[in-house]
Amino acid sequence: MAPADAHVPIAPELDANERALLAELRATFPPARLLTLADDLFVYECDAQTFDRGRPLCLVLPETTEEVCAVVKACASRGVPFLPRGAGTGLSGGAVARGSVVIGTARMDRIFEVDVPNRRAWVGPGVVNSKLSRAVAAHGLHYAPDPSSQNACTIGGNVAENSGGPHTLKYGVTSNHVLALEVVLADGEVVHLGGAALDAPGYDLVTAFVGSEGTFGVATRILVRLTPTPEGVKTALAIFDSVDDACRGVTEILKRGITPAAIEMIDQTTLRAVEAYIHAGFPLDAAAVLLVEVDGLVDDLELQAERVLEACRVANVRELRLAKNDAERAKLWKGRKQAFGAFGRLAPNAYVLDGVIPRTKLPEVLRAIASVSARHGLVIANVFHAGDGNLHPTILYDERQPGVVDRVRAASDEILTLVIAVGGALSGEHGIGLEKIGHMGSLFGEIDLEQMRRLRSVFDPRGLCNPGKVIPAPGQCVEPGRSHRKLPLGH
Amino acid sequence: MPAPMAPASEAELVTLIRAAAEAKRGLVTEGGGTKRHLGPSAPAGTERVSLRALNRVVAYEPGDMVVCVEAGIRLADLQQVLAVHRQWLPVDPPFAASTLGGVLATHSSGPRRLAYGTIKDMLLGARVVGAAGQASKSGGRVVKNVSGYDLHKLQVGAFGSLGVIVEANFRVTALPEASAILWLATPSLAGCHETLLDVASSSLRPCALEAFDLSSSHALAEAVADFPSGASLALIGIEGSHPIVARHRRDLAVFRTGAQASGWLEGPAVERVWGALRDLPARHTSDITLRVAARPHDLPRLLGELQPLRARLTGTAVQAALGIARISVAAPDDVPALAAELSKWQSLAKASAGYAVVESAPVDCADRACLAWTAPVDHSLGARLKQRWDPDQILNPGKMVC
């Protein structure tokens, strides 16, 4: 073993096993790549959802698959849990690491190979989503999944969460874009799943791994599909005087056989916050707008736009504005993608929810959310992927107000209950993590959950990899302190 | 062959799987019974279970564009239900009598996968009965979902070895308003293949790019009067709005100049071609069919290296932009000798980051066990999965090699 490095301090409250593990890691990692002090670890206590927190044992920043293996083997031999972490932009507490070793992928940010003719790229897990798209833009390609956090979030994090984004309506989510993975399993074994050729024989373990929220192992190399950049794009802003009409606009558009690249809804609360910040020209008096984008070959964009207009007319649209040029288009999208940042103007804290409902239930559920908002005296903004039925009600509050956090949690639980009651899903793209683990029992039965545990145990028999996430332990379906009141639908 | 057991409800299926589990007796599931020649054989002593009696549309809300069906429903029957609302499940797998359960279990796909993806991309959730007779669900009936692990997707292509799908939920799509097919006849399959890769690299968005060798083209010409016999065929499918079809007709004209004959098909003729492509694999149930796949632009070279056993060749179909080829050969008397030849193919394919495996062989072929049904991997996760989920080998034993 290499001599102990005086620059890597070890906290005295750790037990002997943890101290021994840190000593072992010090032999491999220089101080800049191994953080152990409480002050340094503070930002790693939570992800972008700040309710759930926990102090990690340490953060290591490996640069290679071999280094990830070394960390995982060290953890495995001492029975210490670990988890991978990308940019920490997750929204379900999936990267909270109480007492665990955090394997940060920030330095595994190489694009290893771009295969232009076959439209694929091998990337490290730490590659930032939008950086990959920029790197291949000159070849007329892009990486299609585009979460709002795409300027910070990593491909590895996207793989863990099976991330979506506005354009997944047409192009699909992360799992539709991952072909192969190199994974370090929980015992340190390096395995290769999937392949460069389609339909590899055997079970589809790539699709199983994508969306496993870091509980199946650490992805160290990822083969993704690259998508040709569309020849033409048209972006329209449809302005509605009622939320119900905007919702109807969504189903009318889809009914006409067009698959827009995106249909996003932005409500009045959000419009006002965004407009003050971005100046995109959003109408402040509208009840809601739909941001509708059609793309593809230039030949039928006109026709598609006409059909969008026709659909919106049936739904009583007030006005439909077409972006005249790329600058206008970029502004509209900036307004949409920076909505969450703009909420900072309205309240110091914003809690983003994530649920998916059948699209025909949009009016009913949005009305019910408005009544939850009124009942709890909380402002709830709605800016979401309407074409997918993927809601993101965002509760705006000030955590310094006494008792407000309890009200926020209660309102959020009520909204999730609503979503499930209409046949929806707990999460469309943010994951279960810690945040929703207590709700899993309301969507799935014990047999369903047991089957999921059986899959996890195939990848990680000892449960060392991101323990306590996604699937509740047997009999642990309701998190203490959370209400699960059944709510009537509607007002 | 005695009639299979045919449970009429999930409860009946659960009962019979529990009985089998108790007796440690293997079960082999089937739907339309069209793909028995796919994959290795189950060991002797297993019993057959048909899912055909479970064939209802459980729920269909056209406004949500989501449908929930029982596994035993025929794909063709489901398409009729959806067509009333001008929608379809955009898959076109082989074998007209296929059931949804069968398409899922074998991960079957057809030419238009290029535009729409496979059934796995449309599968939103499922109810599955496991090896101990326990029914469980995963996913849901919404189009986007990350609530828990996607266990249902693990069932796709698993040949029923991890569970029996009882019910499945799919996202559906609006029927295209226009479609057309450009066919090109050239002297060689390689020529067709290269042409289609050029189309794939262009800015055009075809829904299918399929190439066929002389034998397969001959078979297609029997079903579609427009096709010439005696040449290799390249087919370029287009679906979408009228302006999209018009654009392709204009821009694809350049590809016709190199062909010895070519033509555009529209209207009912297009449906006839899709039907002929769907029925083509049924001609090879008595052959041994290999699936060779690589990165699309590596596949032409790989196919050249394989030097197919020309004397025995009965058909080759290439999905150019997907990088998948199916090569059928007449089953020889000496199957082990063929198997030995194929092991060389496996290493050549591996060197190109691809694979070559046997996809089907005649049901009555005595030496099926010696064929290479799978390509080697560097881990035992698949075997561990089967062991963990079905330790007594009750569900479709032997059908999935890990």
Image (spheres, coloured by chain):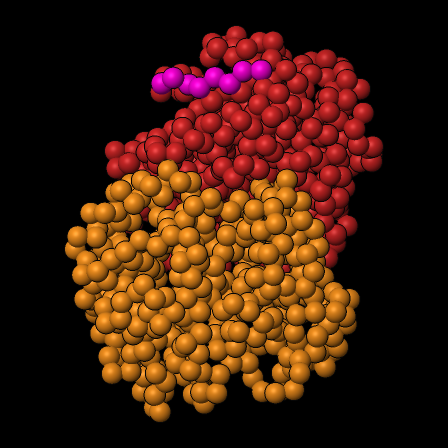
Between residues B183 and A230, which one lies in front from this camera angle? B183
Rendered position, B64 above or below A32: below
Residue at the spot 44% in from the left edge and 24% down from the top edge: A235
Which quarter of the rendered picture does the N terminus of chain B lie within?
A: bottom right
Residue at the spot 31% in from the left edge and 53% down from the top edge: B264
Question: In the rendered structure, does residue A320 fall within the stretch colored magenta?
Answer: yes
Rendered position, B164 above or below A340: below
Residue at the spot 77% in from the left edge and 33% down from the top edge: A482
**Residue A112's x, y, as percent?**
29, 44
Rendered position, B332 above or below A52: below
Which chain shows up in red?
A: A
Rendered position, B331 above or below A475: below
Q: Is residue B33 visible?
A: yes
**Residue B5's x, y, as percent?**
70, 78
**Residue A84's x, y, as percent?**
49, 42
**Residue A123's x, y, as percent?**
35, 43
Chain B: colour as depicted: orange
In this picture, residue B365 sits left or right of residue A255: left
Question: In the rendered structure, does residue B340 fall within the stretch colored magenta?
Answer: no
Between residues B223 and B206, which one lies in front from this camera angle? B223
Task: State the extent of the magenta-drawn residues as a range.
Answer: A318-325
